C-alpha cells in the first residue's frame, strides 16, 4: 500500500505487514520509523534506535541508545535508564519492613541523640513500586515528654527536596521501642524521595551506618561524607512546604548520619 502523506513528506504513515509506521518531522530528535503493530500489539513494538541521546526530548519519549545498549525514557525533565536497577530488589510482602537506605547499612546500627527543633532529611530511592502504610523509627533511650515526627518529601528535577508529601502525627518517645506512624503512600521505582525526622527534645534513636545513604553535594571539597540536610525549625511549626534548598543545610559535622527510618509494605 502506498504512503499516506499528511503534510508534504513528513510526518507520514503507511501500512505494511499489518503494522503502522510513523515518522516524526524534521524538527523532532526522532527521525526513524516507529513500528506500531495493530491488534493490541501482538508482535511487540519498536522504538527508535539512536547513537546518542536526543538533545531536548519531550517528557514521555522513549528510545534505544545503541551506543550504551540501554533503553531510555524522558520523565519529568530527566532522562532515565529503563532497566532492573543497579541493586538487587526483593519485593516485600504485606506487612514487611524495608529500611529506607540505598541497599546496606554496613553492620549494626548506631544511635542518634535528638535535639529540640532540629530537622534532618536524606535522599532515598525506592528500588520498586511500593505502597506503604507505616513509617517507623526505633527509640533506644527515651526522653520524658518528648515526641518526634517523620517527614517525606518529593524531589525536583535536580534531585533536591521540594514538595512535602507527608508529615506524620507525633510519635511518643517518652518510652523506648518501635514508634510507628500510619500513612498511605505509593512510592515509585527509581524516583528520588527525601525522608527525615523532627525532634521536640532529645530522645535517642537508631542511626544508619555511614555507607547506608548517599553522600550529598557540598560547596567545597571534603574528605568526610555529608549525609543529611539539617534545618532548625520550631517543632510546633508545620514542616516547610516546599523545602527551600540551601547548600548551607548540608550538615558539616562528620558524626551526623541519617536517622534509621523504616517503611512497611501495605
Image (spheres, grey):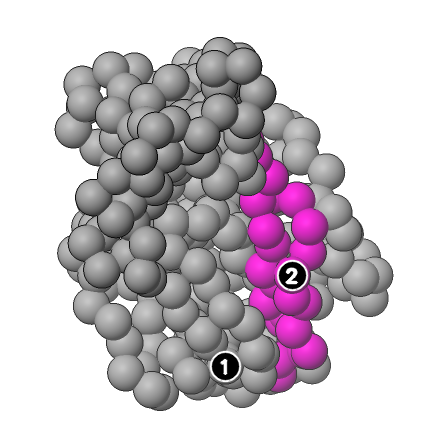
Q: Are marks 1 and 2 in contact (CB under 8 Å)?
A: no
The location of residue 104, given as percent across then percent down, is 23, 55
| Residue named by callout 2 | 165
Q: Is mark 2 on a helix, strand or loop?
A: strand
Identify the image quadrant of residue 105.
bottom left
Query: Which residue sits at x=45%, y=74%?
Result: 131
Taking the magenta stretch, the answer to whether it contains residue 159 is: yes
> Where 179 sits versus 12, above or below?
below
Taking the magenta stretch, the answer to whether it contains residue 162 is: yes
> Where 180 sits versus 6, above or below?
below
Residue found at the far front of this picture: 1
- Does residue 115 appear in this view? no
**Left or right of residue 22: residue 160:** right
Q: Give the range drawn in magenta.
A: 147-172
Nearer the observer, 199 or 122? 122
Query: Which residue sits at x=45%, y=49%?
Result: 191
**Residues under labels 1 and 2: Cα distance?**
14 Å
The location of residue 161, given as percent across then percent down, is 60, 43
Q: What element carries label 1?
A: strand
Q: How crowded is mark 1: few (under 14 residues within 10 Å), some or many (20 or more)?
A: some
Q: Main secondary structure of the magenta part?
A: strand
Q: Quadrant of the N terminus?
A: top left
Identify the image quadrant of residue 236.
bottom right
> Where 149 sits versus 23, above or below?
below
Query: Which residue sits at x=50%, y=69%?
Result: 186
Q: Quadrant of the C terminus?
A: bottom left
Query: Which residue sits at x=27%, y=76%?
Result: 92
- Does residue 108 appear in this view? yes
The location of residue 41, given as percent across then percent down, is 28, 57
| Residue 62 marker | none
| Residue named by callout 1 | 133
The location of residue 20, given as percent across then percent down, is 34, 41
Amino acid at each position: 500500500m502506498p504512503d499516506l502523506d499528511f503534510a508534504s513528506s513528513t510526518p507520514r504513515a503507511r501500512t505494511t505487514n499489518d503494522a503502522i509506521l510513523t515518522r516524526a518531522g524534521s524538527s523532532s530528535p526522532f527521525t526513524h520509523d516507529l513500528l506500531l503493530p495493530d491488534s493490541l500489539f501482538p508482535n511487540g513494538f519498536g522504538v527508535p534506535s539512536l547513537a546518542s541521546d536526543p538533545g531536548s526530548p519531550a517528557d514521555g519519549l522513549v528510545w534505544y541508545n545503541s551506543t550504551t545498549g540501554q533503553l531510555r525514557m524522558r520523565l519529568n525533565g530527566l532522562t532515565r535508564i529503563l532497566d532492573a536497577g543497579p541493586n538487587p530488589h526483593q519485593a516485600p510482602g504485606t506487612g514487611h519492613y524495608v529500611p529506607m537506605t540505598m541497599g546496606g547499612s554496613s553492620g549494626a546500627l548506631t544511635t542518634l541523640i535528638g535535639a529540640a527543633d532540629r530537622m534532618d532529611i536524606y535522599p532515598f530511592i525506592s528500588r520498586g513500586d511500593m505502597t506503604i502504610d507505616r513509617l517507623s523509627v526505633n527509640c533506644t533511650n527515651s526522653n520524658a515528654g518528648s515526641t518526634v515526627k517523620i517527614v517525606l518529601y518529593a524531589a525536583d528535577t535536580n534531585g533536591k527536596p521540594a514538595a512535602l508529601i507527608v508529615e506524620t502525627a507525633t510519635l511518643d518517645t517518652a518510652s523506648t521501642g518501635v514508634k510507628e506512624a500510619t500513612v498511605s503512600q505509593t512510592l515509585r521505582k527509581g524516583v528520588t524521595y527525601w525522608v527525615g525526622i523532627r525532634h521536640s527534645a532529645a530522645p535517642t534513636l537508631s542511626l544508619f551506618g555511614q555507607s547506608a545513604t548517599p553522600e550529598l553535594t557540598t560547596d567545597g571539597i571534603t574528605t568526610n561524607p555529608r549525609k543529611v540536610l539539617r534545618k532548625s525549625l520550631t517543632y510546633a511549626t508545620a514542616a516547610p512546604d516546599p523545602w527551600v534548598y540551601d547548600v548551607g543545610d548540608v550538615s558539616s559535622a562528620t558524626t551526623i548520619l541519617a536517622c534509621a527510618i523504616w517503611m512497611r509494605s501495605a
